[in-house]
Image: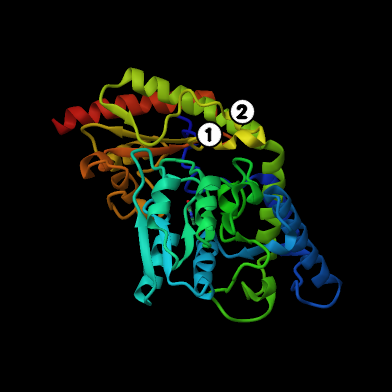
Amino acid sequence: MADKKLIYMDNAATTAPDPRVVEAMLPYFTTAYGNPSSGYSLGYAAKNAINTARETAAELLGARPEEIYFTGSGTESDNIALESLRLSGKRQLVVSAVEHPAVLKKAEQLEQEGFRVTVIPPDREGFISPEALERYLTPDTGMVSVMLANNEIGTLQPIKLLSEVAHKYGCLFHTDAVQVFGQLPISVDELGVDYLSASAHKLYGPKGVGLLYARYGVPLVGVIRGGGQEYGVRPGTENTAAIAGFGKAIELAALEMRQRAAHEHKLAVHMTRRLLKELKGVCLNGPEVIGTEVNACFDRNRLTELKRLPGNLNFCFEGIRGTSLVIRLDMEKICVSTGAACTAGHDRVSQVLTAIGLSEAEANSSIRITLGKDNTPAEADYVVELIRQTVEELRILNN
Ligand code: PLP
């Protein structure tokens, strides 16, 4: 029997590098290997590649190239943004309870050093409302950090309204846009953010490279010390190949974004309809999937109407363990997850699902399916069918 083909539906964890991205990276391993800081042609070629990627990133965000800093990951970008609180002259940091550990753990570190950290609980769908945020702001709030979209349940926060509230109180505003950059249109001016984090491996680019947008003139301090690369904010010889690959991934995302989002949304709606109809004891965690108009969000002003990332699904299946389902699907070469990749291997209950009000049992009965540009309708149907069968079998075994 021929080997089964792998079906990858964990695109929020990482994406498969696009072959066009890999091709764009190759010269920086073979012929154009110069140090970007070197003062001769081989170095200039590497520097040019970095600057081209910077311009491409800036264009997609509606920013200036000088406002883009390449980093080693989305995690590092989040850390640098929060580190900059130290220069604000204020002592309070406000974050949402559904942030990625890159924000929550950095906040914990700042708290241990004497800063006051306030964590805002979300509502049932994972949203933080402007009214809720305002209740926590004080004259001593230096920074607010709320993610653009959640990595587990896809909730898209009303960042424009949240940043307006934060600015009314004179605080800086950071958003972790790692799950959104390259998936949906983002304008830093429309969102009104001071800092924004992104990561290449979520948009079919390489792992180990991120970017931080920092609005011109805002306080900014890196977490490591060294040479003058990336304006001194992220010292260390640049990973030229990865940055060039990131640039290519951004260029492709800009061209294909609308089509990718519409495709993923269509598959997500189809899978949701089938699972809710064909299985009992299933519920969708997070905002609605069915009934949203993804195409409309591409008219710039209507992005705010979209409540959930197009390819994100998260279901609770009563009476089974999510980890058992993930393992059984893996045996069929299907990759889905129980939650964030950084905690999935640790069998810890999802803090995001419990923060939106699920019980521990419900959170442990949930799985995340995140669709990507290369998933097909046939794969979607096959995965639904296998989930249906496996959940029924697991329920019988558990009884
Ligand atoms: N923030 C969010 C919302 C994420 O989903 C991730 C990755 O899963 C990160 C930050 C960290 O990005 P990186 O893997 O590049 O460190």
Q: Which mark is residue 91?
A: none
Question: Which colour assignment does the render follow?
Answer: rainbow
Estimate how packed mark 2 is, as few (under 14), some (14 to 19) or many (20 or more) residues with alpha carbons within 10 Å: few
- Residue 389's spot in the image, x, y percent? 31, 24
Q: Amino acid at mark 2?
A: Ala
C-alpha separation, residue under disc 2 versus residue under disc 1: 9 Å
Identify the mark nearer the N-term, 2 or 1.
Answer: 2
Nearer-the-camera pick, 19 or 303: 303
- Report the residue at 68% width, 70% height from top: 230
Nearer-the-camera pick, 278 or 58: 58
**Residue 118 location, quadrant:** bottom left
Q: Which mark is residue 306?
A: 1
In the image as oriented, which residue stretches furthest toward the top? Answer: 277
**Quadrant location of the N terminus in the rendered image:** top left
- Report the residue at 40% width, 20% height from top: 274
Nearer-the-camera pick, 329 or 105: 105
Looking at the picture, does residue 378 appear above or below residue 150? above
Residue at numbered disc 2: 296
- Residue 334's spot in the image, x, y percent? 42, 36
- Residue 116's spot in the image, x, y percent? 37, 69
Looking at the picture, does residue 68 appear above or below residue 387? below
Q: Amino acid at mark 1?
A: Leu
- Report the residue at 40% width, 25% height from top: 384
Label 2 SS: helix
